[in-house]
Image (tube, grey):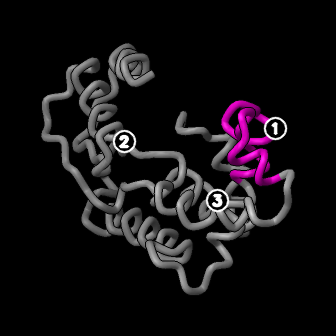
Amino acid sequence: QAAKVGEFFKHCSMDFDQVLHGEMSRQTDTAKIIAETMGHRAELVQHKGADEFDSENLLKAYLPVLASRSDEYREMIYGDNNWFKSDRNFKRVFNDLIELWQQDENCSFESWQSFRSRVMVFLNQIVEDGHSNRRVLIATSGGLISVALMSLLSLQDELFSKINLTVNNAS
């Protein structure tokens, strides 16, 4: 995907003044592949603001909560036909995980409110730092893209998981 994006930018003679990416290896790799494919020579800049939400801790914290809700959930999460193997079950569990995270006022890792705030501070900082007249490419993940879309479209938090599943890291 990243190479195709780079090829498209090259074909359209698009260039960027700066390429930002999060700290995750897949974000760094994506930024490098896009930049190399399009012939971008400027420095790639790692920025914590472009990081995805902490899905690992989200799963550790809330999968057991969902599994305790019913035998059906327990089987869906821990059984042989786990939730990753079915699109319908994946969407159901993902939506419920995000809902639990958004409602958790005592989150032991980056909370939904903190994540959303971090993303908005990051995006606003890009504009305020004089980037408004510059082209900036951000290699990030679906969570940041979803928060940005929610902000642009004035959407409620409850739509985050639906937008995230639609974006699916491909915007």
Label annotation for residue 10: none
| Residue type for callout 3 | Leu
User: Distance of mark 2 from mark 3, alpha carbons?
Assistant: 28 Å
Few, some or many C-alpha atoms within 10 Å of disc 2 (few <14, some 14-19, many ≥20)?
Answer: many
Q: Nearer the viewer, residue 139 or 64?
A: 64
Magenta-highlighted residues: 73-94
Secondary element at image label 2: strand
Question: Marks 1 and 2: in contact by CB < 8 Å?
Answer: no
Which is closer to the viewer, label 1 or label 3?
3
Q: Which image quadrant is residue 1 in? A: top left
In this image, 93 relative to 150: left or right? Answer: right
Q: Residue at x 37, y 41 (%)?
A: 139
The location of residue 31, given as percent across then percent down, is 29, 35
Label annotation for residue 63: 3
Q: Nearer the viewer, residue 62 or 119?
A: 62
Q: Which residue lies under the disc numbered 2?
A: 139
Q: Which image quadrant is residue 85 in? A: top right
